[in-house]
Image: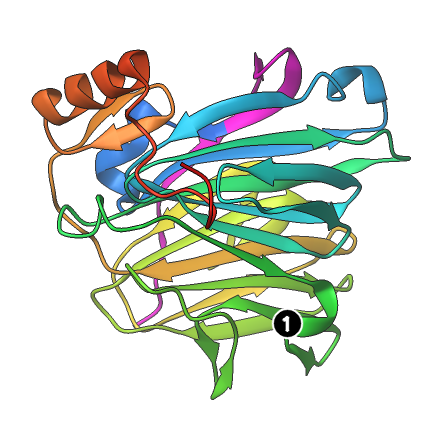
Amino acid sequence: MERTIETKVKGFRTSDGAGVSLVRVLGRETVKGYDPFLMLDSFDSTNPADYTAGFPMHPHRGIETITYLAEGAIAHEDSLGNKGMINAGDVQWMTAGSGIMHEEMPQASERMLGVQLWLNMAQKDKMKPPAYHSLTKDSMPVVDLEGGSLTVIGGEYNGVKGFQGEHHPIDFYSIRLEDGAKLTLDAPADDQVIFFLLEGDATISGEKVDEKTAVLMSRGEHVTVEANDGPIEVLYLHSTMLEEPVAWGGPIVMNTREELNLAFQELREGTFIKDRPQGEA
């Protein structure tokens, strides 16, 4: 049975961090429907003044943040001692777990284009140790398609495996199609399937979808994506729902208000970070 579009969420321009202009697509209002995906922000600018103020050092707990850059560069460092650059085509997959401090500072580029996705963690995993994974463009498998290509960022596509997360499993693909190309994807009938149109408009299951729009698909066994108004890049997300309560406060996502209050208390008292680089007190 062909999946159809259940809901559409068109992104809107807003500001976050130290004054970064971005397009917010998924957020607090979409938590229940788009479970386990909490937030999706998109970056798309040719003006460095929109984004170079960046995201100075800030905390996270209870989620995984996945940053994919199609174009541009972002400098990164965190409380685990990781430091480096996310370049065009790269992915940063960060497990906040029990708590991490990090900063992301976009660098002036001809164009900054990409997304940051927040993936919820199950209650049983939220206080597990944090981790950081750098996925370079060359390390991610690319599958050639008729009229395009598919990069397996996370999970698996037709036996081709990308990064395998240690917590809630997802399939995450970047799909590029030339004008007139079409791709049909299979997915288990009862799982969540979400698309995000990063660049260009597409037709999904026969319905036109505008750029910078996320769509939640109905239950079914397969879905078709078409580029019929120029080339496109669409992000595909597939997972199962957690169906757990969400208590969300700024950069921290827990299951109860009490857990959230404790996290902010620990931030004030300096006990938030449970895991530090080896040799650091």
88 lies above or below 226:
above
Residue appearing at x 75%, y 74% in the figure: 147
In the rendered image, residue 269, in percent from the top left (x then y), is placed at 27, 14
In the rendered image, residue 121, in percent from the top left (x then y), is placed at 26, 48
265 lies above or below 88:
above
In front of the other: 19 or 227:
19
- Asked where in the image residue 228 lies, by quadrant, the reply is bottom right
40 lies above or below 181:
above
In this rendering, would 242 be left or right of 226?
left
> Looking at numbered disc 1 in the image, what kind of residue is underneath it?
Met
In this rendering, would 263 be left or right of 65?
left
Residue appearing at x 85%, y 21% in the figure: 47
* Residue 211 in view here: no
- Asked where in the image residue 141 lies, by quadrant, the reply is bottom right
**Residue range (magenta):** 1-24
Few, some or many residues within 10 Å of mark 1 (<14, 14–19, 20+): some
Q: Which residue is mark 1?
A: 140
In this rendering, would 260 be left or right of 276?
left
In this rendering, would 43 be left or right of 279?
right
Question: Which quarter of the figure is the C terminus placed in?
Answer: top left
Q: Main secondary structure of the magenta part?
A: strand
Question: Which quarter of the figure is the N terminus placed in?
Answer: bottom left
- Asked where in the image residue 255 lies, by quadrant, the reply is top left
* Callout 1: SS: loop
Q: Is 201 inside the magenta-drawn segment?
A: no
* Residue 59 in view here: yes
Residue appearing at x 66%, y 32% in the figure: 43
View extreme (bottom): residue: 159
17 lies above or below 143:
above
Residue appearing at x 62%, y 51% in the figure: 202
